Image (tube, coloured by chain):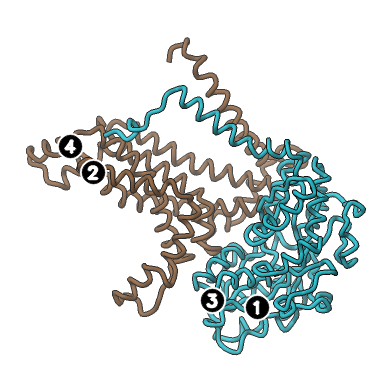
């Protein structure tokens, strides 16, 4: 960036400091607040309770499971978009964007119907003879992952589409002419091309899933406890704000570490090739 | 095709859009400043709908604007604590459990009854120094008669000891007032007294099928009841009235050991800048005109104004004489132990 460009970024910089960095600093400050000055007591309390640690692990696992689920669903859809004609592409974009325009709360409550005893999944299982009686997937991690995959799917499809839109479809034909089979084309040509989009999508999906309070609470129930519920409990019920801040900082750091690792991967030339 | 290229906006257009968004974000503040109205925190759902429909026009007639802001009692407290000196609500709506916290943390103030025309219409037990009682929530057991065995459950003991209820009962954690009141009653039945929560935790350990039905809040239970996912849950008569108004088959049982009850009060937040409007709202909420409407379905709120006759529907749940015999928990003791109970129960439920 040229030095003369600095005034143009100044408003953005000020806004970032005022509305992002300052609240974050307040949050971190709260997490160290004690009656006699700065203290690590709240972090010690958090890590001193095995239950909290388990909740942290559960949250990371939920994020990873959703990342895997959205990848398995998102990649074929993005490839279909890539190969599709103008009409198919418009339909796919429409179907991807429309759910994002619907409130997360509404989508979550719709999943109660889908996952419930009288929902289509239960009826299909009974109809196929896989279960003898209606089954509810509510309050199960599987049900929650299914809901999160649907809710967060656009977050992985859109970066993939953005990447593939810049890539000529003839690339696969060239690889075919060179004698590569479909799997070889996918692994050696398409996957490295899509990796930056995948990494961006994984970051978005993981961050969104691990902080998705409403869906976690409604679909996961009280048996599946995740970090956002823990924070809400400390703030809204127990009014222990320093501990809530410490938990929020731990969530931020653990998610941040993963994001940094993924970002570093996205910059690794050997991994992403020349995409 | 690059999807982003399909959406174009000029710099001027963006400027107008940004200004519009900023202006719309400021609207509530501007409206509040211009009208000199009150912002009243109210429980979400049927409370919010009823208060907006009944009280907003009445307060308007008194010359003030009224904004009904839905929030659970715990959330009201958290928001007030987050902005000391500049409260986002002029009045709060809560039960004695949260009121004790609000007093302890110096978040509400004593009221001046001389500013309430309808104050004399309240029974002395409803004339709190921190605000009037607008209704009494009577709690018990809600059930779907199509899904539970006959005869109907007699009380909490039945739910644990009759195997017919296995897997059909839903509970919430100790953060819920409704749940805490039920657990103190269960502690009396299965333990040595209302605070013997170890007996309750042991009961759940001995009946793990009950742990499967634990959800986050009564509101979620209402949704699950509608979907036929649960058949029995702990609730107030108001919840059952709401379910019935939605056309659902819901019935209410007063536990044989007594119905836990919670007065619901309006409180004046400390530092409110709209005292007159807040008093006008408070006065409207305890007026005969308002309570005559609020006692009807779908809210069926028990009227605290002496001049308001009970409806047959409310009398089927509770009469004025019975109000005195309800079980009123010791919220000071509950608040002292609640932190530990919440953590213990959450760990137990998570397994």
Cβ atoms at labels 4 and 1 below 8 Å apart: no
4 and 2 marks on the same chain: yes
Q: Which residue is mark 4?
A: A169
Q: Nearer the viewer, mark 4 or mark 1?
A: 1
Using the image, name the chain to which the residue with label 2 belongs.
Answer: A
Q: Nearer the viewer, mark 1 or mark 3?
A: 1
Residue sitting at x 59%, y 78%: B143
Residue B345 position within the rendered picture, expressed as x and y whole percent measured from the top left: 63, 66
- Colour cyan maps to chain: B
Residue under label 2:
A87
Task: Tell me if I can see residue B208 in this picture.
Answer: no
Other residues around mark 3 within 10 Å, as few (<14) / some (14–19) / many (≥20): some
Q: Regarding mark 4 in the picture, which secondary structure is present there?
A: loop
Residue plotted at (88% across, 51% down): B110
Quadrant in the picture for residue B164: bottom right
Q: Are marks 2 and 3 in contact (CB under 8 Å)?
A: no
3D distance between C-alphas at marks 4 and 3: 55 Å
Q: Which chain is brown?
A: A
Mark in the foreground, 2 or 3: 2
Residues under labels 4 and 1: Cα distance? Answer: 65 Å
Q: Are marks 4 and 3 in contact (CB under 8 Å)?
A: no
């Amino acid at each position: 960036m040229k030095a003369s460009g600095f005034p143009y970024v100044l408003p953005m910089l000020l806004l970032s400091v005022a509305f992002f960095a300052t609240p974050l600093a307040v949050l971190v400050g709260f997490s160290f607040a004690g009656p006699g000055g700065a203290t690590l007591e709240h972090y010690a309390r958090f890590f001193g309770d095995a239950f909290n640690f388990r909740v942290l692990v559960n949250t990371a696992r939920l994020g990873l499971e959703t990342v895997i689920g959205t990848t398995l669903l998102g990649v074929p859809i993005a490839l279909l978009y890539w190969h599709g004609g103008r009409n198919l592409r418009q339909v796919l974009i429409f179907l991807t964007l429309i759910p994002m325009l619907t409130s997360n709360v509404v989508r979550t409550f719709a999943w109660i119907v889908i996952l419930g005893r009288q929902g289509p999944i239960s009826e299909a299982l009974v109809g196929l003879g896989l279960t003898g009686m209606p089954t509810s997937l509510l309050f199960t991690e599987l049900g929650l992952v299914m809901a999160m995959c649907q809710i967060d799917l656009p977050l992985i499809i859109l970066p993939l589409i953005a990447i593939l839109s810049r890539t000529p479809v003839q690339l696969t034909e060239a690889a075919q002419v060179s004698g590569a089979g479909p799997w070889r084309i996918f692994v050696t040509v398409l996957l490295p091309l899509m990796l930056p989009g995948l990494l961006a999508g994984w970051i978005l999906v993981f961050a969104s899933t691990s902080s998705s309070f409403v869906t976690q609470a409604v679909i996961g129930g009280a048996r599946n406890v995740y970090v956002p519920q823990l924070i809400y409990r400390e703030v809204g019920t127990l009014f222990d704000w320093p501990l809530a801040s410490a938990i929020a900082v731990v969530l931020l750091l653990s998610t941040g570490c993963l994001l940094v690792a993924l970002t570093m991967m996205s910059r690794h030339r050997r991994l992403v090739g020349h995409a | 095709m690059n999807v982003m290229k399909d959406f174009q906006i000029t710099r001027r257009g963006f400027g107008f859009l940004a200004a519009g968004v900023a202006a719309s974000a400021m609207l509530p503040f501007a409206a509040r400043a211009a009208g000199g109205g009150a912002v009243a925190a109210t429980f979400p759902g049927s409370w919010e709908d009823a208060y907006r429909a009944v009280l907003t026009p009445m307060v308007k007639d008194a010359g003030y604007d009224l904004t009904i802001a839905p929030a659970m009692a715990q959330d009201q407290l958290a928001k007030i604590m987050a902005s000391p000196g500049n409260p986002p609500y002029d009045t709060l709506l809560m039960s004695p459990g949260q009121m004790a916290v609000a007093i302890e943390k110096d978040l509400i103030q004593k009221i001046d009854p001389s500013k309430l025309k309808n104050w004399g219409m309240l029974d002395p037990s409803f004339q709190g120094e921190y605000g009037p009682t607008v209704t009494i929530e009577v709690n018990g057991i809600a059930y779907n008669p199509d899904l539970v065995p006959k005869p109907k459950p007699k009380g909490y003991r039945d739910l644990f000891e009759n195997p017919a209820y296995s897997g059909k009962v839903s509970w919430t954690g100790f953060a819920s007032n409704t749940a805490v009141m039920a657990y103190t009653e269960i502690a009396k039945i299965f333990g040595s007294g209302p605070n013997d929560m170890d007996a309750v935790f042991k009961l759940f350990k001995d009946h793990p099928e009950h742990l499967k039905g634990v959800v986050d809040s009564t509101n979620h239970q209402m949704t699950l009841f509608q979907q036929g996912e649960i058949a029995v849950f702990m609730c107030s008569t108001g919840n059952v009235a709401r379910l019935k108004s939605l056309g659902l088959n819901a019935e209410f049982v007063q536990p044989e050991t007594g119905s836990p009850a919670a007065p619901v009060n309006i409180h004046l937040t400390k530092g409110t800048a709209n005292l007159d409007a807040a008093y006008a709202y408070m006065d409207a909420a305890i007026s005969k005109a308002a309570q005559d409407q609020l006692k009807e379905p779908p809210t069926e709120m028990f009227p605290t104004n002496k001049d308001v006759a009970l409806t047959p529907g409310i009398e089927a749940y509770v009469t004025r004489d019975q109000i005195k015999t309800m079980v009123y928990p010791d919220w000071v003791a509950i608040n002292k132990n609640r932190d530990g109970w919440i953590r213990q129960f959450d760990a137990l439920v998570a397994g």
